Image (cartoon, rainbow, N blue to C red):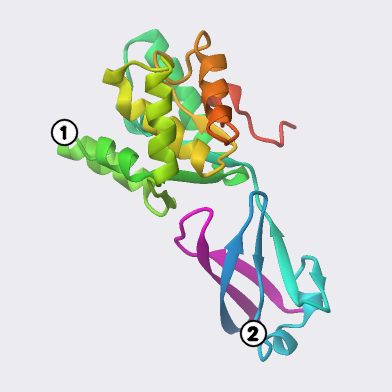
Amino acid sequence: MPTLVAGVRRWRYPQVASVSLFRVEKDLCWEYSFILGLTRDRLVWRPDVQDLPRLGQKDLLCSATDSEQFVELPMGPSVYIETSIVSFLTARASRDVVQAARQRVTQDWWTKRSKFDLFISNLVLSEVAAGDSKASERRLLALDGIPELTVTSQAIQIAEALIRGGALPPRAAVDAFHIAIAAAHEIDYLLTWNCKHIANATMRGTIEDICRDQGVDPPVICTPEQLPSRNTK
């Protein structure tokens, strides 16, 4: 019985991605590459007509419509990884009780990250690359392969609105951009330990209202302990 595995190469949500299907039978492996479009909750691609008969829709292990020859691959909830997450993930064990607890929670959540579709941005990469070279190397290594979201014009407008509306102070402009990028790209969750400016309960309503005023749904801002794996058994 052939085994079919779908693999997603680096792409920028929610634009265009390159996807490869690997069909494994005995000791042989065939690779089929497709260009796909992305919606909020699924990947959709149209296989080349010449490849479809060879793959066989019954082998795809997901839904397809014969008339349009479309295949849909469900996606997990999307999560934007803010800089503080990877900092706690890779930092040396802290003697501070609170910091150490956050490190353990973050490390535990990271082992379950396959339940989600993770995303970062160039702002995250810039922040994690700063500081001690060995520490930054650990942070960058942890983020290797995670798709990078672009800073769109809409994200800029949202960030400016967040600061102008008092949701975040001007000195926290980078934090405003983390929220704005996640909102502009329709990310479900923004994961952070930055409870001063981002996961701030007193400003949550203001942040959400401003995002909606800008025509986007706000991401759910939370910490790793508030975002457990979907499989809690």
Q: Which residues are magenta?
A: 1-25
Label located before the other in sequence (1 or 2): 2
Q: Name the residue rendered at 64%, 49% in the picture.
A: 40
Residue 86, how many percent across, how many down?
38, 34
Above or below, comparing residue 56 to residue 35 in the picture: below
Amino acid type of the residue that numbered disc 1 sits on in the rendered structure: Asp
**Residue at image mark 2:** 48
Q: Residue at x 23, y 40 (%)?
A: 129
Q: Position of residue 32 (x, y in %)?
A: 58, 80
Q: Which sits in the foreground, 219 or 23?
A: 219
Q: Residue tagged by mark 1?
A: 132
Q: Are marks 1 and 2 in contact (CB under 8 Å)?
A: no
- Give the residue type that dot 2 points to: Asp
Look at the image and say whether residue 20 sits in the magenta stretch. Answer: yes
Snapshot quadrant of residue 167: top left
Secondary structure character of the magenta stretch overall: strand
Is residue 62 depicted above or below 26 in this figure?
Answer: above
